[in-house]
Amino acid sequence: MPQDEKFAAVVSNAASDIGSYIKAQREAAQVSIRQLAERAGVSNPYLSQIERGLRKPSAEILQQIAKGLRISAEALYVQAGILDQREASPVIDAILADEALTEQQKQVLLQIHDSFRQQNASSTVPADAASDLTETAVAAVEKVTRKAAPRKRSATTTPPAKEESA
C-alpha cells in the first residue's frame, strides 16, 4: 500500500499548491474570500477548503474562480496540473490578458496560434498548407464568434418600390 500513500500525497500536494496559489491571487487582488466565493458562484466554506488544500477543485470550478479573480483559467489549470505550461510568448500573454475575449475565444485563438507555430516548425510544409490552415482558422474563429455574439433580428421591412420609366 505504499503506492497508494504516494498517490494520496501527490494529490494532497497538488490540492494545496492550487489552493495556496488561489489564495495568493485573491490576496493580491485584495478580494475577500466571501467576495471571491460570490463572484465565482461557490460556497464560502468550499472555497476556504480549496485554499487550505483540503479539496481539489474541478476544471469547471477553476474556471469560475478564474473569472472571479479576473485571471486566465489556463493559469489555474497549469497550476493545478491539468495543463502543461506553455512556452512564454508576448502573443499568448496578450491573448490571455484580453478581458474583452471569452475563455472559449481565447482557447480558439491559442489553438490557432499553436497550429501556425507547429506548421512553421515543420521542415516539409506543402506550399498550399498555409492557405488551408488559414481557412480552417478563419472558420473556427467565425464559428466561435457566431456562438458568442447573439444575432440581432432585423425588423421586417418592405423592399423599396421600383421606379417606373415613363
Image (cartoon, rainbow, N blue to C red):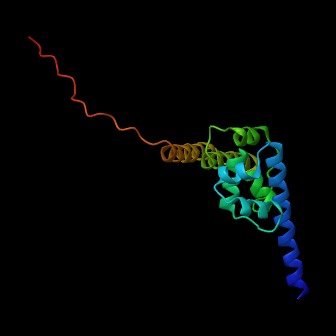
Left or right: where 77 falls relative to 153: right
Residue 5, above or below 86: below
Number of marks in the image? 0
Quadrant location of the C terminus in the rendered image: top left
Q: Locate residue 134: give its quadrant.
A: top right
The answer to whether 10 is drawn above or below residue 83 in the figure is below
Residue with the most extreme bottom position? 1
User: Which residue reaches farthest right?
Assistant: 2
- Picture coordinates of residue 165 (x, y %)? 11, 13
| Picture coordinates of residue 118, whole percent (x, y) | 73, 50
Residue nearest the viewer, comparing 147 with 52? 52
Report whether residue 152 is seen: yes
The reply, left or right, for residue 78 in relation to residue 13 is left
- Residue 140 placement (x, y as % from top left): 55, 48
The quadrant the N terminus occupies is bottom right
Q: Residue at x 73, y 46 (%)?
A: 71
> Looking at this view, is 135 or 113 the one in front?
113
Write the residue at 69% across / 64% down.
58
Which residue corresponds to the image point at 79% horizontal and 56% vertical from the top-left?
78
| Camera sees residue 114 | no
